[in-house]
Image (cartoon, grey):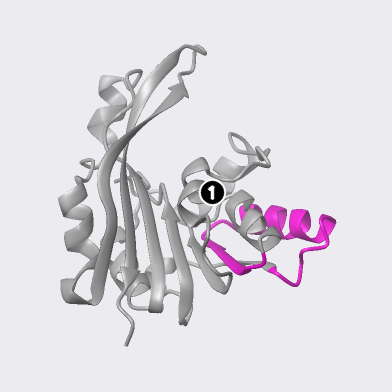
Amino acid sequence: MTDTDPRTHWDEIYRTKRSTSSGQPSKLLVQISEGLTPGRSLDLGSSNGDDVVWLATQGWQALGVDISVVACDRATARAASLDLQNRARFEARDLGQGVPDGPFDLITALYFQSHVDLPRAQVLREAAGQVAPGGHLLIVSHAAPPPWASAEMLAKADPFPTVDEELEVIADAPEDWIILRAEKVSRQGKGPDGASAELWDNLIWLERCAA
C-alpha cells in the first residue's frame, strides 16, 4: 500500500487513465446473474457504472458506490442520459467508513482491489451481512498478476488472494451460505502492447440461506 490519499488517487485515475467507459457490463456478471429475480442491488467499487447501469436495464433497483466523486458523477450522468436515473443511482462513499444499509438481493464486488489504502476484508465482511435471506453475493478478484507485470509493480502489490482466503473473509458463519461456485477461472486479456494473455480470477458466487 502507498500513503496516497485514496480519494485523491482514484479521482485522478478517473480523470486520466479511466476517463471513458466501455459501456459494457462484466461478462461474468451477465452470465452469473441470469435468471435472478430483480430486486435491490449494490455494487462495491462501481467505477464508471457499467455494471450498475446494466442491472438497471434488467429491472434492478441498482446502487453503485465508489470512493471517486469523478467516477460517480460520470456514472450518474450516463444513467440520466439513458433515462435510468430512477433505477441506477451512484454514491461517492469511503466504504471503509461503512457500507450502505441493506438488505440487498444482490451485492457485487468485481475486482474490488486497490494498491492504495483499502480495508477490503472489513468491507466485504460488512457487505456480506447486508445480503438478504435468499439473496446473492458475487465476488470476482484478481488471483494472479498479469504476465506483463514488472518487478516494481509486483513489489507494490498486495498478495493476491486465493479462493479459500476469499471465502474465509466473508463467511464468518459458513452455515449461513450456500456455495454455488467457488473456483479459479481464466479469461483472455490484452497487455499494454495489445498482445493477448491468459488472466486468472477468483470467482465466488454465494446464496444466503433463507431465514
Is 177 on the left-hand or right-hand side of 21? Answer: left
Q: Residue lying farthest front?
A: 35
Question: Residue at left 67%, top 67%?
Answer: 59
Residue 148 in magenta stretch? no
Residue 63 in magenta stretch? yes
| 80 or 208: nearer the viewer | 208
Question: Residue at left 67%, top 62%?
Answer: 56
| Vertical order, 142 against 67 (above or below) | above
| Vertical order, 20 against 78 (above or below) | above
Chain part drawn in magenta? 59-87
| Vertical order, 114 against 41 (above or below) | above
> Residue 102: percent from the left, percent from the top?
46, 81
Q: Quadrant of the C terminus?
A: bottom left
**Residue 193 is at least partly visible in this image:** yes
Is 199 on the left-hand or right-hand side of 86? Answer: left
**Residue 172 is at least partly visible in this image:** no
Number of numbered markers: 1
Is 71 on the left-hand or right-hand side of 7? Answer: right
> Residue 32: percent from the left, percent from the top?
45, 52
> Residue 127: percent from the left, percent from the top?
37, 71
Question: Residue at left 51%, top 67%?
Answer: 42
> Residue 192: percent from the left, percent from the top?
49, 17
| Vertical order, 144 against 33 (above or below) | above
Element marked by disc 1: helix
Dot 1: within a 10 Å radius of its alpha carbon, few (fewer than 14), some, or many (20 or more) residues?
few
Is 177 on the left-hand or right-hand side of 207? Answer: left
Q: Dividing the picture into quarters, in which one does residue 60 lie?
A: bottom right
Residue hosting label 1? 30
Kind of residue indicated by mark 1: Val
